[in-house]
Amino acid sequence: MNNKIILGGLLILSVIFNSCLKESEEIVLTPDAGNSFIDIENDGYVVTLNAQPALEGQTGTWRLYMGENGRFEDIHDPHSKFYGEPGEVYLLGWELSVGDNYKAETINVSFKPLRPVIISEPGDTIYNNISLKLEAEAPKYGATGNWEIIDGNGGRIENTDNHIADFIGIENEPYTIRWSLSYGSKEESVEVSFHTDTLRANAGEDNLDIITSSSENDVKYYNLNAVLPAGATGTWELLDGNGGRVYSNTDPHSVFEGLADSVYTMTWTVRIDLYESVDTLQLRFRGKWGTWVDPRDNQAYRFVKIGKLEWMAENFNYAAPWSQYGRNWYYGQTSRANIINGRPVETEEERKFYGRLYNYYGALDAAPEGWRLPTRKDFDELHVLLGGKLYAHDKLVLGGESGVDLNFAGLLSYSGGYLNNRDNFGDMDISGYFMTAEFIESNFGVYIWIFSDSGASYAAPLHAYFHGASVRYVRDVQ
């Protein structure tokens, strides 16, 4: 064979081989899909991908390998936006290709699931009510919410598509309420179950000692604090009291206007559908007197500030249980009563006015928390602060300008276990005998302060067990 022909063929084969080798070297695919996105939560449930662009002559394409309802804004844009759904995990590939050759790198994209949360957890029972203000965490990132009753009769929900809604049921019925969040094809829900109760109006706590300005005579103001159940209407009505005014009869927190030392009685009526309930409220603004209520029997007592002490302006009237030595009585009310003057205290009105007579131990037993028996020094300072012998009497008596309002409830000499003796009651409407804290241990004596139209003095120490006197407790100014 001709050597020239052989050489030429070899040259052709060499060119073809080198050409193929060069083409093979040019097809180098190195896709870079960028970073993954894990537990994303934002408006639209979207991420901006960050793959490396394809080289010249190559084609870049995003592929969805795993996950539901995901989409690319532009499959050939390495920085395309990718939209998904909450709670879904996606496997994405960034694929580079030349002709029939391709290669891909994958990343993960996941979005946080919907998490519905009910804020207003009612407990097992909606006490004193048949309605409930429903409140859930507001939907975020484009989700929508919805309330529904899934169990229970005769109930309804107002504003079901708002995260704050009103549930209204019927009395004594079990209900289950569901709050659902939806986005795309995803839905998650949470449930709460409870019983309704009987509708009972709540006008707020009685307040017989509202402190406002220091003036006794000007108009006073107070914000009412009733409860308006979900879906209900309410109405205030003033029943009793001078110069009182409710500014808005339908506002549970309306401003109330009144005068000092007048007791106001009003009602708060709530209505839901066919149900109606009424609660009564009493209010009083402090003028000359404050008012304190004994939580043991709910009796109210006026008190007045004199110097550094607050003095009860009424004789104490608590029926303290008898203890080993403690005793208390109403005037003339014992089985062996000898009434020297006056009359037995029988009516509730008189019992409140005169109060009970306590021996020293009974007065200690009956003392409410925060109050104490006055000492001799306390009585002496009271007398001095109000003008002493010349002026104090008229200020201390019932109706006097001090407001202490001392009255004359008399004294009891108790016979105790001495069966042949009588229980002597004397000086009713003549003198007031007031127990002090001054106890003489050596002879079981106690000083009693005597107040009458002839002045004020101390009796010689009387036996702490066998004598009953009125009690006016004191406390430090609050």
Image: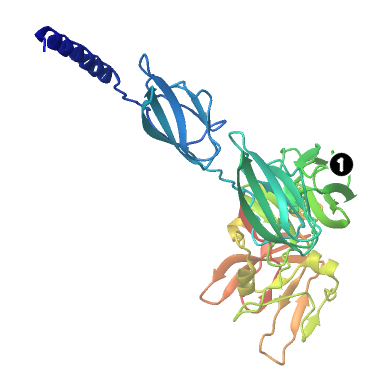
Q: Looking at the image, which residue is at 45% across and 28% down?
A: 62
Which element type, helix, strand or loop, lies under badge 1?
strand
Q: Vertically, is 99 above or below 314?
A: above
Report the label total.
1
Q: Position of residue 178 (x, y in %)?
A: 67, 52
Relative to 30, 309 lies left or right: right
Q: Looking at the image, which residue is at 66% across and 89% down?
A: 417
Q: Nearer the viewer, residue 469 or 167?
A: 167
Which residue is under mark 1?
245
Q: Vertically, is 319 above or below 379?
A: below
Q: Position of residue 61 (x, y in %)?
A: 44, 25
Q: Residues within 10 Å of mark 1 (few under 14, many from 20)?
A: some
Q: Vertically, is 112 above or below 103?
A: below
Q: Position of residue 35 (x, y in %)?
A: 37, 30
Q: Quadrant of residue 197?
A: bottom right
- Type of amino acid at the residue the image marks with label 1: Arg
Q: Position of residue 343 (x, y in %)?
A: 85, 75
Q: Looking at the image, which residue is at 59% across and 81% down?
A: 324
Q: Vertically, is 45 above or below 289?
A: above
Relative to 278, 191 lies left or right: left
Give the farthest residue toward the left: 3
Q: Nearer the viewer, residue 234 or 248?
A: 234
Q: Nearer the viewer, residue 355 or 147?
A: 147
Give the farthest residue toward the bottom: 420
Q: Nearer the viewer, residue 141 or 36?
A: 36
Q: Looking at the image, which residue is at 72% across and 51% down?
A: 148
